[in-house]
Image (tube, grey):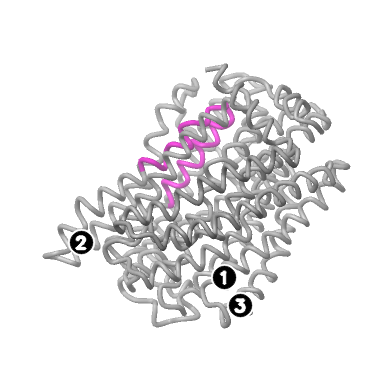
Amino acid sequence: MQSEEFITAAEDIKRPSIFRSTAIMSVATTFSRLTGYLRVFALAFALGGTVIADTYNTANIMPNILFELVMGGVLASAVIPVYVDYLTNASKKETDYIVSNSLNIMFAFGVGLSLLGVIFAEYFVKAITYLEPARATPTMVFFFRIFALQIMFYALTSIFVSILNSNRKFTMPMAAPIFNNLTVVFTVFGLYLPISRNNPDLALLVLAIGTTAGVAMMAIVQIPSVLRTGFKYRPVFNLKDKAIKRIISLGLPMIGFAIAVQISTWVIYSLAQKIKMGPTAYQYSLMFFQLPYAIFAVSVITAIFPELSEQYSRNDLKKFKRTLSLGLRATSFIVIPASATLLVLSHPIISLALQYGKFGPEAVNITAQTLRFFALGLLSYSLYNMLTRVYYSLQDTKTPMKISMLCVPIQVALNFSFIGILGVRGLALGYALTLTFAVVAQLYFLRKKIGPLGISHMLRSFGKQTVAVIPAAVVMYFVYHITDGLAMPHLVSQFANVLTPVGIGSVLYIGLALLLGVEEVDFIRRLSRKVFSRG
């Protein structure tokens, strides 16, 4: 497929096009991730690589585990296809009814789960620290008891995101985390640090409340955008409604998927407890690992998901496959060099980003090493998430569940095998290898389901991109070591160690890609022109 065929694929997608949607969402997501970095910076500055940092990060991941375990799968996989169907084929009154009913039911379950977390906090903490019982401190129980309230706000946020995405309103869902991040940043610098000088216990309470308030803000800021879609809220609560039954029917297989994923997460954080700064290094490096995916790939995925659902509902498999190929190859063009950058420059990146306050050289070193192992799986991570959403658009939630269930014992075995040799880095390596296996399985079963996907052409594209990136990565490595040896002020040196090799490497990658005839270069150029010409 030539570049012109990429554009043909794009033109199959009705306005607002994937190009415009992707550009807007990329800007929103970039700001979101920038503030996400500020959040991590604030926490690293204030807590460093201490036991308190590990305790905070472990307790703060637990509401996510519980939410995804009980509710996240249903919301992620089932609400959008059902809602899009109602938007297309039902009256506005019926649509408002089902959305209101879904919202009320999900929020009620979220409140109930939050209360269970508050009441039984000690037992949930013992579960996450099962492999290292000494980590089940009163401070972790204290943190989680407050963090459990986040679950009901996650439920609201997920419903709001489903409503907005179904109406092809993507900006606010991408921007909402900005308000969460800024709330935490203000809490740390404006409240926690000043209070901790005189009253450490009160400071921890303020930190916990501020963290939970940030999650609440994610839901609150989306309400105006939801109302602007024309949605009119109704105080209804009907578990027997046929649309709810359909959502549950589609979502039930995803409960198995969610259980599988959260078992993996539980094992990761349980094993990480055995290592000094394990949870903190894992979580911080995971954020930097996800950054390239979040800025570009997640925007493409979110934009094409409703289109894939619609194309499949029209039984237009030709356009469906074209849209899929567009998403996969455009994403890989960005993700492959990003992976190489993280592999080569993990230490200067983490040093520049986090080595301030209580976050010292030891913490930088273990976080950077963990990030390097994560980087091996960046392409697989991006493809996995996109292909999972492709299955959702086919209203097939069983296949992702089966693949996920198959991956759980693989990842658990890899984690236990690697952690003794590599420490927390082994958890990142196990994650990367498991994702690669999962992508192979996804493509295999998707081909069986809808026929040939043009995988050989995708592999040729990936191969050309990889050939282009290898010399660029080598040059980045040597440029970094040259700049690192120059006599410069510390902060200037840190910036030079990252920006100089990245700049030179990027130019070299694009130049080599052009020489090799990597067609995605022309696609990205045309994509940019389309975006800006449509202003």
Q: Secondary structure at mark 3?
A: helix
**Tag 3–tag 1 contact (CB < 8 Å):** yes
**Tag 3–tag 2 contact (CB < 8 Å):** no
Q: What amino acid does circle 3 point to? A: Phe
Number of residues whose C-alpha sits closer than 10 Å to that of mark 1, classed few (under 14), some (14–19) or many (20 or more): many
Residue identifier under label 2: 203
Q: Secondary structure at mark 1?
A: helix
Q: What amino acid does circle 2 point to? A: Ala
Bounds of the magenta segment: 151-179
Residue identifier under label 3: 418
Secondary structure mostly seen in magenta is helix
Horizontal arrangement in the rendering, residue 435 relative to residue 372 (left or right): right
Furthest-left residue in this view:
198
Q: Where is 99 relative to 412, above or below? A: above
| Gap in angstroms between the C-alphas marked 3 and 1 | 7 Å
Residue 315 picture location, percent across and down: 82, 29
Q: Secondary structure at mark 2?
A: helix
Q: Nearer the viewer, residue 305 or 219?
A: 305
Residue 92 among those drawn in magenta: no
Residue 415 picture location, percent across and down: 61, 74
Residue 167 picture location, percent across and down: 57, 26
**Tag 1–tag 2 contact (CB < 8 Å):** no
Number of residues whose C-alpha sits closer than 10 Å to that of mark 3, classed few (under 14), some (14–19) or many (20 or more): some
Q: What amino acid does circle 1 point to? A: Leu
| Gap in angstroms between the C-alphas marked 3 and 2 | 37 Å
